[in-house]
Amino acid sequence: MQQQSRKSVKDLFEKAALYTKPDEFKRAGLYPYFTEFSRASDSAESEVILGDRPIMMFGSNNYLGLTTHPEVRAAAVEAVSQYGTGCSGSRMLNGTMDLHVRLESELARFMKREAALVFGTGFQTNFGALATITQKGDVIVADRNIHASILDGCLASFAKTQRFRHNDMADLEEILANLQADEGRLIAVDGIFSMEGDTANLPEIARLARNYGARIYVDEAHAIGVLGREGRGTAEHFGVEREVDIVMGTFSKSLASIGGFIAARRDVIEYIKHHSRPFVYSASLAPANAAAALKAIEIIEREPHRRHHLLSMSRRLRGELVSMGFRLIENATAFDGITPILPVVIDDEVLVCRFFWELMNEGVYTNPVLAPAVAHSLIRISCMATHTDQHAERLLEAMRKVGKKLEIIQ
Ligand SMILES: Cc1ncc(COP(=O)(O)O)c(C=O)c1O
């Protein structure tokens, strides 16, 4: 066999050497990622400390502001005292504690489902659940704007994936109508789309699923604790919970922790529990994280005013930003369209980064979101239940000032 010198073969690391975009943005003083916060500056986490100055946080998914809630903190600390810091093993073997079982049964009760299953993260949940419940010969029919973890679950599955145009029900129907009778089909969507902040058209999806014999999987990561009379998310909001077969949630947003779960029929959960590789071959959730999520569920049920305030704050900010002249992605589905995510379209990545830094100079943190994560580059503002009228005023003032300076509004 002919030997090849190292120089004559393609270097695997060439792509890394050619990837200079972050450095270019850093040199231009525009790089907006990996900002280092040191701590929450107030008990409600609506302000954080950056260097030595407080910054208003309008970029967190901690929608209900529970990560610093005294009872959630205390529950996590107590779990560390009682169980230690980790479980050092898979749930299937040595890693199941009574805390995990309690958490799953509370999630099932809260979500009004027969059973629930907890994973290490939300990403792992989508990845593990989707790749397991579908198999060769099945088809996953997914919205084009689904979260990366759903897409990766589709890619890891032996099922075929077909994407429909974002929230385009005619396109969805056309795909469903062309499937073969022996193809099992699962429609997969985000309840609230994470970057655009709009909702899936679940009533119509439910109707199509009924007509074409499809199952429905809804990622309620951004909707649990936020939408629905009791905070169960988009399906509850639209009154179609019975039609949704598998609901997914994460602890990294309103549930003030880290981890994820699915809730569904008992046999579906049992199947995934025994077959999902990211569940079986990964260590179980740390006790503190499980305890924090458990406490957060209790508070969500006990304190609905948090989500009411969150939504009325979001409604007000959306209205004011639009009347200032900003373009926000609208919710095309037939309801009032209010979610805590306010996507301000800028459509130019350099301008988005400049906008981000100008807002930082005004003491406001938001999330710059650039293509290809989204179709339109945007500033993603996210509201929290702990934002006060004063925070809202300061945000609006900063948006007006920066919007005018960068000539995005008049
Ligand atoms: C819609 C959606 N699904 C899933 C995830 C993953 O959740 P986690 O952060 O818990 O891994 C996210 C988080 O970014 C998300 O926005």
Image: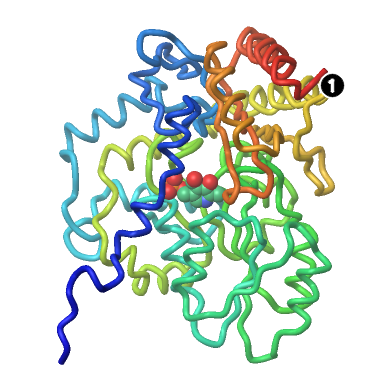
Q: Which residue occupies 58% across, 17% down?
A: 358
Q: Quadrant of residue 291?
A: top left
Q: Is residue 31 above or below residue 220?
A: above
Q: Which residue occupies 26% across, 50% down?
A: 98
- The amino acid pointed to by label 1 is Ser
Give the percent coordinates (x, y) of residue 190: 62, 54
Q: Which residue occupies 83% across, 17% down?
A: 410
Q: Quadrant of residue 167?
A: bottom right
Give the percent coordinates (x, y) of residue 203: 78, 58
Assign the N terminus to one quadrant of the image: bottom left
- Residue 14 shown left or right of residue 236 in the figure: left
Q: Is residue 390 above or below residue 38?
A: above
> Which of these two is toward me, 287 or 18?
18
Q: Which residue is mark 1?
A: 323
Give the percent coordinates (x, y) of residue 35: 41, 27
- Residue 177 shown left or right of residue 6 in the figure: right
**Circle 1 — which element?**
helix
Give the percent coordinates (x, y) of residue 145: 64, 55
> Which of these two is toward me, 168 or 398?
398
- Residue 271 shown left or right of residue 180 in the figure: left
Whether residue 110 is visible, yes or no, is: no
